[in-house]
Amino acid sequence: MTESNKFFLLITFDNWGYNQYIADALEAKSHTVKHINFHQFEYKYPNLWHKVFNFFIKNLGITNLKHLHYHKLILKELDTIDKIDTTIYIKADFLSPKTIKAINKKSQKSVLIISDSINRYPKTKKILNLFDKIFSFEKKDCQKYNLRFKTNFIYKYIEEKKSHLKYKVFNISSFDKRFPVFEKIGKCLKEMNLNYKIIIFTSKKDDDPYLEFSKKPLSIPEINNIMQDSEILLDIHRNEQQGLSFRVFESLGFHKKLITTNQDIVNYDFYDARNIFVINDIENPDIPKSFLTTSYINPSKELIDNYLVENWVNELID
């Protein structure tokens, strides 16, 4: 194996499918990549007693039967691999330190990418000392834990957008604490007589005057099709999160305007008030008509290139 052709192990809990774009970008540079997505590993409790037992030992911080299952399957996948140039972990807080150490024994370098707030996943703190490089999209976490700052990426760039669009505003999200905010914004958009589409993925709700619900998650291609048919994307950040979500980078890749609640977006080099409207008061969202009616201003291609996944992965290769 030459220096220009390295072997990368990518270990992720890829529940939406974004991390496969990292594997594809590395392979496009003539590297060999093995992507282990342990979100695809199925675990079934042998009986109800095991499920109850796991509930208690998990909450007591002893162990987690699902995580032990991940450990066995991941190490089994590595049986035939003798040497790894770099192992890249995403969502490593799902893995035990024992698992990570076992993998790192076969790897020359180890890289952790954190795309969530550490406050949201505090178990991450226990494994920070196990990696050679750690990147985070949270500026506060970078300062507090001495991590390297790295945003999410543009996984798809469209050269030309559609001229005839179906929706003014679009968002799809999981059901969580942000739900009341989605309702308020949906109400605002409906009162403005805008043709919008906000889909909440959940089995807990069936009807709402302002939102749609889906019991099955949509695939990335399905979501991309709706985004291409939409003029503006909506981004509602989590309270404990300052880092920018994929919705922001989808807006850049698809040439879409963005409505967001993330106040920190004004500090990024691609921020343009003509393209991005920041909601300051989520209790009373007020979206100016001038923002809704003016055209999107394309950022320079040089600026966009910095966030394209094919360039984003370069920092992982070094």
Image: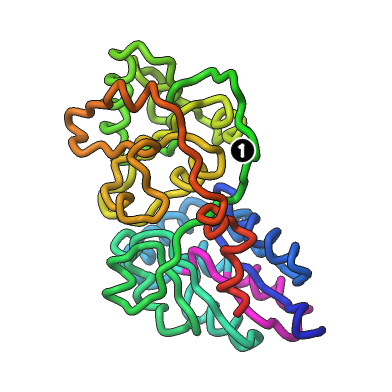
Numbered range of the magenta stretch: 71-92
Residue farthest along the right direction in this orientation: 1
Q: In the figure, 230 relative to 5: above or below?
A: above
Instruction: Point out residue 221 in the picture as x, y percentages from the top left corner.
Output: 64, 37
Q: Is residue 244 left or right of residue 40?
A: left
Q: Is residue 99 left or right of residue 211?
A: right
Corner quadrant of residue 28: bottom right
* Three-letter amino acid code of the residue under disc 1: Ser
Q: Is residue 161 in view from this perspective?
A: yes
Instruction: Point out residue 253 in the picture as x, y percentages from the top left corner.
Output: 55, 44
Q: Which residue is located at x 38 percent, y 21 percent?
A: 293
Q: In the figure, 305 relative to 68: above or below?
A: above
Circle 1 is placed at which residue position? 219
Q: Nearer the viewer, residue 274 or 67?
A: 274
Instruction: Point out residue 302 in the picture as x, y percentages from the top left corner.
Output: 55, 56
Q: Is residue 75 left or right of residue 62?
A: right
Say if the magenta span includes residue 75: yes
Q: Secondary structure at mark 1?
A: loop
Q: Nearer the viewer, residue 106 or 56?
A: 106
Q: Which residue is located at x 33 percent, y 45 percent?
A: 237
